[in-house]
Amino acid sequence: MKRIFTLIAGLSLVAAVNAQPCIPNNSYTSPGFYPDTVTNLPPVPVGVAYSGVITAVIPTDTVYMTYAADIDSVGVTDIQGLPAGFTWAANTVSAFFHGGDSGCVAITGTATAGQVGTYPLVVKGMIHLTAMTMPFQVPQDVNGYKLVIGTVGFGENDYYSFGVTDLYPNPAADVANIVVTNNETSVVAVNITDMIGRNVSSTSHKVNAGENTIALNVASLPEGVYFYSVTKGAQSVARKLIINR
């Protein structure tokens, strides 16, 4: 059955990981945007490196002018309304994502005290689709997202506390993505131990205020059950990780 899909550009905001500004959260499988414009982006504290997060899952088909259409790709061409010092970048060079795939865009920056306020955003998008065997390019704006910049110390405790909200995929084969929330810029240690407590991997990662995705290379680990821990100072979260190929 053809899925009627609102023709809007998809985006995803995540903390910069390795060379990519963001990694799509593959735990989302239904077409849509996470979070939506009602939930909105996390607030922006002053003086702290920021990265917001939205994940887009692009459908394979839609309805265009009452005709069934196949979606070739959906992309972001610009994000208007960003305060000075904030930029955006996608996980693909073109900022376009193929139908049936997930994609992401990261908005990053550090707010100053003089920027306190609310900044409505307009995401300029373009949809490439095929209907009636003919190609179409459909521009579409997304309204509703905004950046809310708070005062100094804003949200230091209630903005985003340190924690681990997701691990995907689990079981993992080559790469396991850990989603870490944090209320400041800091460095976390990620350790993986086997079932008898032997440490098999130790890495350090910079995380920003907001939601961050840490990509762990687990390709060298044999299949089995492991435990991973994410530690920031005296705080630590430990969870199970399964390697299966």
Image (cartoon, rainbow, N blue to C red):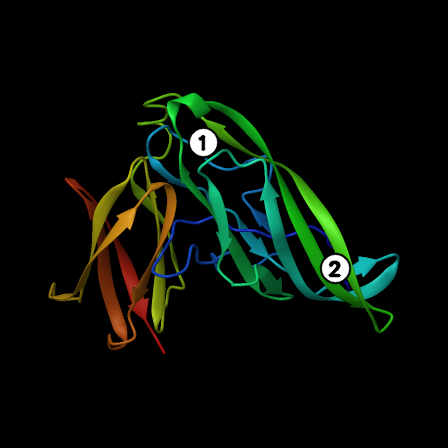
Depth check, mark 2 against mark 1: the one in front is 1
Q: Quadrant of residue 100?
A: bottom right
Please name the amino acid that badge 1 sits on: Pro
Kindly report the distance in space between the C-alpha atoms of the residues bearing marks 2 and 1: 33 Å
- The N terminus is located in which quarter? bottom right
Dot 1, how many residues are within 10 Å of its Cα: few (below 14), some (14-19), or many (20+)?
many
Closest to the observer: 231 or 46? 46
* N-term-proximal mark, 2 vs 1: 2
Q: Residue at x 38, y 22 (%)?
A: 113
* For the residues bearing labels 2 and 1, Cβ distance under 8 angstroms: no
- The C terminus is located in which quarter? bottom left
Q: Is residue 115 left or right of residue 119?
A: left
Q: Is residue 53 above or below residue 151?
A: below
Q: x, y (%) of residue 111?
A: 40, 31
Q: Mark 2: which secondary structure? A: loop
Q: Residue at x 36, y 23 (%)?
A: 154
Q: Which residue is mark 2?
A: 3
Mark yes or no: residue 83 visible: yes
Please name the amino acid that badge 2 sits on: Arg
Q: Which residue is mark 1?
A: 43
Q: Is residue 170 left or right of residue 137?
A: left
Q: x, y (%) of residue 203?
A: 20, 59
Q: Quadrant of residue 39?
A: top right
Q: Is residue 169 above or below residue 15?
A: below
Q: x, y (%) of residue 126?
A: 69, 55
